[in-house]
Image: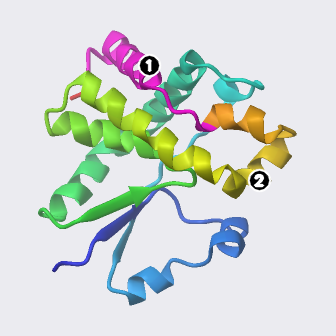
């Protein structure tokens, strides 16, 4: 079996390295690590206490807009994998990860309802692990119940993001 490739969205900062450890252990296990920068430079759309699906759609669109210039690099790296397994993710696995998943699903011919359902599935994985986000919710001064809204991935968010992409760029690709 071929070892999976791990696509990470940014080199970890020192605080993340202290919190989550170094990725060298993955490399020692034979997992190739590809770094590709996807940054959320402007999180103002979701800065409020209870961001809505519309807020998250604007946030996702801003991330996508910031990463447009690097998309050819991303797809070239993915094409070089030539069918090898791929694992990709970010801190929570729902914002930047969902955008990359959306792009990959679209390239593979998935319709908008499939993309929306895929995004929605993250909820079941995230909400039971709310305690892993304690540092984030404390930094924001939110209760676990308030912060849970941020982990509640909704299909409508991805549908609205796709509408913003269609309205601005005429679609993906």
Question: Which image quadrant is residue 87 in?
Answer: bottom left
Find the magenta span and give its range.
151-171
Residue ranking furthest to the top: 167
Q: Which residue is mark 2?
A: 134
Q: Is residue 164 magenta?
A: yes
Q: Is residue 52 left or right of residue 88?
A: right
Kindly report the distance in space between the C-alpha atoms of the residues bearing marks 2 and 1.
26 Å
> Is any part of residue 80 visible from this angle?
yes
Q: Is residue 82 left or right of residue 27?
A: left
Residue 133 image position (x, y, % from top left): 70, 52
Q: Residues within 10 Å of mark 2 (few under 14, many from 20)?
A: some
Does the magenta stretch mainly form a helix, a strand or a loop?
A: helix
Q: Which residue is mark 1?
A: 156
Residue 117 image position (x, y, % from top left): 34, 31
Q: Is residue 128 magenta?
A: no
State the SS at label 1: helix
Question: Which image quadrant is residue 156 in?
Answer: top left
Residue 105 image position (x, y, % from top left): 24, 38
Query: If the image is split into quadrants, where does the C terminus sit?
Result: top left
Q: Are marks 2 and 1 in contact (CB under 8 Å)?
A: no
Q: Is residue 24 above or below residue 73?
A: below
Residue at x 31% of width, y 17% of height = 169
> Between disc 2 and disc 1, whose residue precedes?
2
Q: Residues within 10 Å of mark 1 (few under 14, many from 20)?
A: some
Q: Is residue 19 left or right of residue 65?
A: right
Q: Is residue 173 left or right of residue 127?
A: left
Residue 47 image position (x, y, % from top left): 73, 28
Q: Could you tell me how many numbered marks the image carries?
A: 2
Residue at x 77% of width, y 53% of height = 134
């Amino acid at each position: 079996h071929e070892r999976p490739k791990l696509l990470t969205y940014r080199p970890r900062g020192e605080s993340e390295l202290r919190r989550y450890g170094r990725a060298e252990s993955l490399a020692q296990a034979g997992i190739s690590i590809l770094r590709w920068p996807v940054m959320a430079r402007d999180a103002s759309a979701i800065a409020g206490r209870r961001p809505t699906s519309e807020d998250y759609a604007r946030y996702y669109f801003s991330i996508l807009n910031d990463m447009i210039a690097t998309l050819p690099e991303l797809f070239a790296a993915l094409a070089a994998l030539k069918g090898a397994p791929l694992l990709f993710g970010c801190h929570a696995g729902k914002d930047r990860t969902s955008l990359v998943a959306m792009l990959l699903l679209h390239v593979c011919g998935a319709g908008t309802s499939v993309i929306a359902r895929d995004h929605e599935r993250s909820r079941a994985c995230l909400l039971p692990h709310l305690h892993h986000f304690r540092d984030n919710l404390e930094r924001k001064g939110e209760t676990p119940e308030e912060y849970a809204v941020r982990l509640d991935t909704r299909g409508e968010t991805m549908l609205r993001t796709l509408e913003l992409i269609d309205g601005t760029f005429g679609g993906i690709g």
